[in-house]
Image: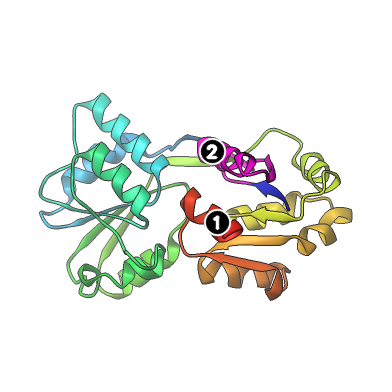
Amino acid sequence: MNVLVTRPEQRGRELVEQLSQHGIFAVHQPLFTIEAGTELPQLPSALARLNAGDYVFAVSRHAVDYAVETLRQTGFHFRNDLHYFAVGSATASYFSAAAEQAVRYPIFSENSEGLLELPEMQQLSEKNILILRADFGRELFAEQASQRGAAVQYLECYRRQLTDENLSEKLSLAKRAGVDTIIATSGEILTTLIEQTDPVDQQWLFECRLLVVGNRLANLAQLLGWHKDKLIIAEKADNQTLFQTLCG
């Protein structure tokens, strides 16, 4: 098994190291770099406008990092009278430690669907929900929350920029290196993989086993061209779960 890891930055490097320590050849090829979002200056006022008991949802550690640093620089902090949420246990723990607040998360399904199943999400009339995210993402959660009566606001804490490297060449190198398994943890990664793979290499792409997180991403992978028997579905997006799902 030769693995292509597409997770960006530190978590991608850590997963490659974990695989390598167990004798598995792994290549780290992130598709995006992460930079500060354009709406970060609006964060203090966005938090101040929320009513006591409203919800704040951080989609990832990147969102947490940029939000915490912005508040620190401006002399603000996360309010004690709000409720905080994350999709997964790892992000929730990270958010809780950084914001010094309790953070709720879905225990069994660490995705938007799981978050929407939480008791706090069933009746959202007159609730305001501030989503700390990238320049896009988590539209399903926002759409469903709006239908349940919430007023939803996005705040771009970070943005993904396509890496400056020649990705088609890098992916072709991965093919020639014998990669037969790809780890992709978001829809953006999946679509970018296809867009950036040279047409002559796309058959290889769809012949690779593909490890994704959750059924929604698996369904997207099938729509994009992967056959169902090529898919491996992890329940959570943390590196340990990805490793155990791939190697267990």
Looking at the rendered structure, the kind of residue marked 1 is Ser
Q: Is residue 172 left or right of residue 25?
A: right
Please state the horizontal and vertical placement of residue 220, each as a whole percent of the image.
61, 69
Residue indicated by mark 2: 14
Q: Is residue 23 magenta?
A: yes
Q: Which mark is residue 186?
A: 1
Please state the horizontal and vertical placement of residue 240, each as a whole percent of the image.
48, 50
Instruction: Report how far apart the C-alphas of labels 2 and 1 lie in the structure.
Output: 18 Å
Going from the N terminus, do you reach mark 2 or mark 1 first? 2
Looking at the rendered structure, the kind of residue marked 2 is Glu
Foreground pick, 91 / 186: 91
* SS of the residue under disc 2: helix
Sort mark 1 into few (<14), some (14-19) or many (20+) by Cα contacts within 10 Å. some
Residues drawn in magenta: 6-33
Query: Residue at position x 75%, y 60% from top?
Result: 208
Please identify the quarter of the rendering in which residue 201 is found.
Answer: bottom right
- Mark 2 or 1: in front is 2
Please state the horizontal and vertical placement of residue 232, each as a whole percent of the image.
61, 66
